[in-house]
């Protein structure tokens, strides 16, 4: 019998009791692209033969309420960005991914996009491999940890990743294998100023904050002296 727990950070958002509610398994890995730290891809530990992983839709946000709807989520920065995100959603549909939830503006005036969740996408689809910069999440089932680690590392990005599990030992073992500068376990976006922050691959070089960040503001000097033998 599989162990399930609610994933409260599916879209950096929190829905009210009126939202659709299911549960993501406890061994879930959320792959985060360099989108200001927002999770864009979830891999759920269910048999790949299953049609779609169960998903808990929770929408959060730190903005004012969306009038006439259960969401508390702010608009995107511009009409151009809204159009860009909606185009990615259309690309996902055309690529054959299953639209589980959302996919439109919700009829709201302004640069809003509904929290959107796709399931079972083609691994080469643009919604999986590219930066969307919007409230779009992709969920994919997997059979074992090796499979999901390979998929998570199969990207040119490597800023951060999330692991959601009750097995902390497995979390540490998996975190070591992920090609990401930051790995959050059972949380998201929690940064300690004493810990270095930065990505790998095309997500950047070097680190900010922490001791490594301070070293960027220093200069090294090498002095070589030849002593008589």
Image: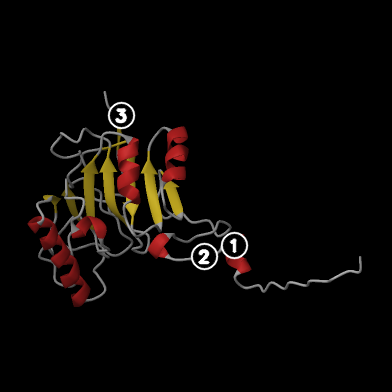
**Residue shown at the point (38%, 51%) measured from the top left:** 161
Q: CA distance from mark 3 to mark 1?
A: 39 Å
Mark 3 secondary-structure assignment: loop
Observer able to see residue 8: no
Circle 1 — which element? helix
Is the residue 185 above or below the residue 1 in the image?
Answer: below
Residue under numbered circle 2? 206
The quarter of the picture where residue 201 lies is bottom left
Which comes before the other along the chain, label 3 or label 1?
3
Residue 178 visible in rendering = yes
| Residue that badge 1 annotates | 212
Image spot of residue 121 (x, y percent):
17, 49
Residue at point 17%, 60% (across, down): 114
Tag shown at residue 3: 3
Which secondary structure lies at badge 2? loop
Residue 179 on image: x %, y %? 41, 51
Q: CA distance from mark 1 to mark 2?
A: 8 Å
- Residue at 20% from the left image edge and 54% from the top image edge: 124
Position in image of residue 69 (x %, y %): 16, 58
- State the quadrant of the C terminus: bottom right
- The residue that appears at 24% across and 60% down in the rendered structure is 135
Which label sits in the foreground, 2 or 3? Answer: 2
In primary-sequence order, the first of circles 1 and 2 is: 2
Question: 80 or 141: which is nearer to us?
Answer: 141
Q: Pointer 3 and pointer 1: residues touching (CB < 8 Å)?
A: no
Q: Are marks 2 and 3 in contact (CB under 8 Å)?
A: no
Mark 2 residue crowding within 10 angstroms, few (<14) / some (14–19) / many (20+): some
Confirm or deny contact between disc 1 and disc 2 (CB under 8 A): yes
Q: Nearer the viewer, residue 82 or 182?
A: 182
Give the colour scheme of this rendering: secondary structure
Q: How many marks?
A: 3
């Amino acid at each position: 019998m599989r162990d399930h727990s609610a994933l409260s950070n599916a879209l950096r958002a929190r829905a009210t009791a009126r939202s659709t509610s299911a549960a993501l398994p406890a061994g879930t890995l959320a792959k985060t692209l360099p989108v200001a730290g927002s999770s864009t891809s979830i891999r759920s530990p269910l048999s790949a033969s299953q049609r779609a992983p169960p998903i808990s839709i929770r929408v959060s946000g730190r903005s004012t309420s969306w009038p006439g709807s259960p969401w508390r989520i702010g608009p995107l920065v511009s009409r151009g960005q809204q159009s860009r995100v909606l185009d990615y959603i259309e690309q996902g549909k055309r690529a054959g991914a299953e639209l589980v939830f959302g996919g439109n503006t919700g009829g709201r005036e302004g640069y809003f996009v509904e929290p959107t969740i796709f399931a079972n996408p083609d691994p080469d689809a643009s919604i999986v491999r590219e930066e969307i910069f919007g409230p779009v999440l992709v969920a994919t089932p997997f059979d074992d940890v090796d499979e999901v680690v390979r998929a998570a590392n199969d990207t040119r990005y490597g800023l951060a990743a999330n692991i959601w599990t009750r097995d902390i030992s497995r979390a540490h073992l998996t975190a070591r294998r992920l090609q990401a500068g930051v790995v959050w376990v059972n949380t998201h976006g929690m940064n300690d100023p004493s810990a270095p922050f930065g990505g790998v691959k095309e997500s950047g070089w070097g680190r900010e904050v922490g001791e490594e960040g301070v070293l960027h503001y220093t200069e090294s000097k090498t002095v070589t002296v030849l002593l008589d033998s």
